[in-house]
Amino acid sequence: KQEVTQIPAALSVPEGENLVLNCSFTDSAIYNLQWFRQDPGKGLTSLLLIQSSQREQTSGRLNASLDKSSGRSTLYIAASQPGDSATYLCAVSLRGAGSYQLTFGKGTKLSVIP
Amino acid sequence: DAGVTQSPTHLIKTRGQQVTLRCSPKSGHDTVSWYQQALGQGPQFIFQYYEEEERQRGNFPDRFSGHQFPNYSSELNVNALLLGDSALYLCASSFGLASNTGELFFGEGSRLTVL
């Protein structure tokens, strides 16, 4: 059974700081890995999608890396802003289990202090 | 371009009642998945519909059922509600089962409170 763990559970940083969120998964036979952002009481916004054959993806101040063999992914946020405050969720889909069935971590709650 | 839309946004039910939640997928998408997110937890997969059939199912009891219509919209039904069914129910849409990047797009969710 695939398990996804996100560390830390919560993180508080001053505005302008660069930060890294971590995600680990137990089964390396993944189809893809997706990072989402969730504001309180809201739905999920897709940030970055990394296919199993890729090593990283970038979008603006966000960079996500994937090391499938070690079962790890990181989300790097550069020059953090108060508007980045949210919960960040990592999710993986397994090859052969139906491409779009995602297993999620519990998320990292990020607070960026002005 | 309309994204994934869900209704209702909030609802309150009592134990033993039944509830129906609705979802319209993003334009061009034909696959709908449902997830349950309890407070402080990550979403958990309930089931997935494609071509009006349930294709994948997570570890949820038969009280949870669904339907997909010819226009690709979907309903989630929960019977005999329990207090533990209180959660945010998220709908996600995508294109195809295994022929695309696998990226999912989520709606804003339906917040169900069972009293």
Image (spheres, rainbow, N blue to C red):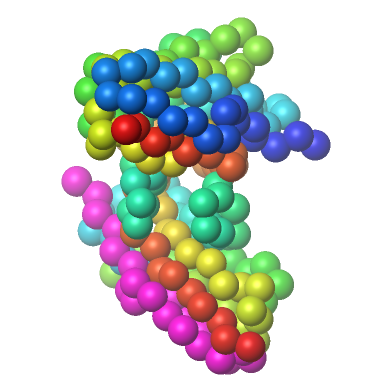
Relative to residue B102, is residue A21 drawn left or right?
Answer: left
Classify residue B34 by image quadrant: top left
- Seen in the picture, residue A40 relative to B80 is either above or below; the reply is below
If the image is split into quadrants, where does the C terminus of chain A sit?
A: bottom right
Classify residue B45 by image quadrant: top left
In this view, the residue in front, A47 or B4, is B4
* Residue appearing at x 44%, y 41% in the figure: B88
Residue B61 in percent (x, y) is at 22, 23
| Magenta region | A1-22
Residue A33 in percent (x, y) is at 45, 55
In this view, the residue in front, A109 or A62, is A109
* Residue appearing at x 52%, y 27% in the figure: B32
- Seen in the picture, residue B83 relative to A86 is either above or below; the reply is above
Residue A80 in percent (x, y) is at 62, 83
Classify residue B31 by image quadrant: top right
Residue A48 in percent (x, y) is at 58, 59
Relative to residue B58, is residue A114 drawn left or right?
Answer: right
User: Is A8 part of what is drawn in magenta?
Assistant: yes
